[in-house]
Image: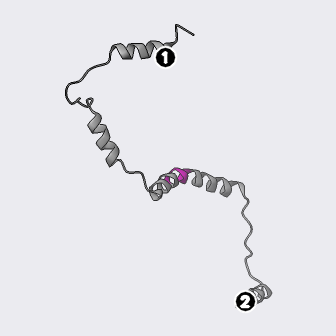
Amino acid sequence: MNINDPWKKLSAAARRCSRKTDGPVEIPFGLDTRVLARLRDKRPLPAELWLRLAWRLVPVGAAVFLVCWVVLPARAVPETSSPDLVEQLMQEVLSP
């Protein structure tokens, strides 16, 4: 058996300092405030969480947009469209 056990020392000190109360015990200072603060504390809604995350991702999205704009080459747009291409497009769009 270990004589220098800290838990035994702590329990012996607690037994020596036990208080005998003859009336109601006061609650510690500030406990009521903390309890009321916990009761009023509402959890954030999932929409609020998504909104906070979305605002943090706006700079990331802008950076990705700029990198893609700079890195990817611009395609040359044909100056005149051929009638065959327009006809094929109209057939694809209008065919059921």
* Nearest to the observer: residue 71 or residue 38: 38
Among the two numbered marks 2 and 1 on one chain, the one whose residue lies closer to the N terminus: 1
Q: On the rendered structure, is 86 left or right of 29?
A: right
Q: Distance from label 2 to label 1 (Cα)?
A: 86 Å
Nearer the observer: mark 2 or 1; the answer is 1
With respect to residue 90, does 52 lie above or below?
above
Identity, as a three-letter code, of the amino acid under mark 1: Trp
Q: Quadrant of residue 70?
A: bottom right
Magenta highlight on residue 49: no
Q: Which x, y percent locates residue 47? A: 46, 59
- The residue sitting at 47% across, 14% down in the picture is 8
Instruction: Using the image, tell me which numbered label, if any, was put on residue 59.
Output: none
Could you tell whether 50 is left or right of 40 in the image? right
Q: Which residue is mark 2?
A: 90
Residue 52 place in picture, x, y as percent: 47, 52
Please tell me whether residue 78 is drawn above or below residue 61 in the rendered image: below
Q: Residues within 10 Å of mark 2 (few under 14, many from 20)?
A: few
Is most of the magenta stretch helix, strand or loop? helix
Q: Quadrant of residue 35?
A: top left
Count of labels in the image: 2
Amino acid at the residue labelled 2: Met
Classify mark 1: helix, strand or loop.
helix
Q: Could you say whether the residue bearing mark 2 is in a helix, strand or loop?
A: helix
Q: Nearer the viewer, residue 35 or 3?
A: 3
- The residue tagged 1 is 7
How far across and down, in percent of the image, does residue 3 sit? Answer: 52, 7
Q: Residue at x 74, y 75 (%)?
A: 78
Magenta residues (range): 55-59
Q: Residue at x 67, y 56 (%)?
A: 68
Q: In the depicted view, which residue is nearer to us: 50 or 82? A: 50
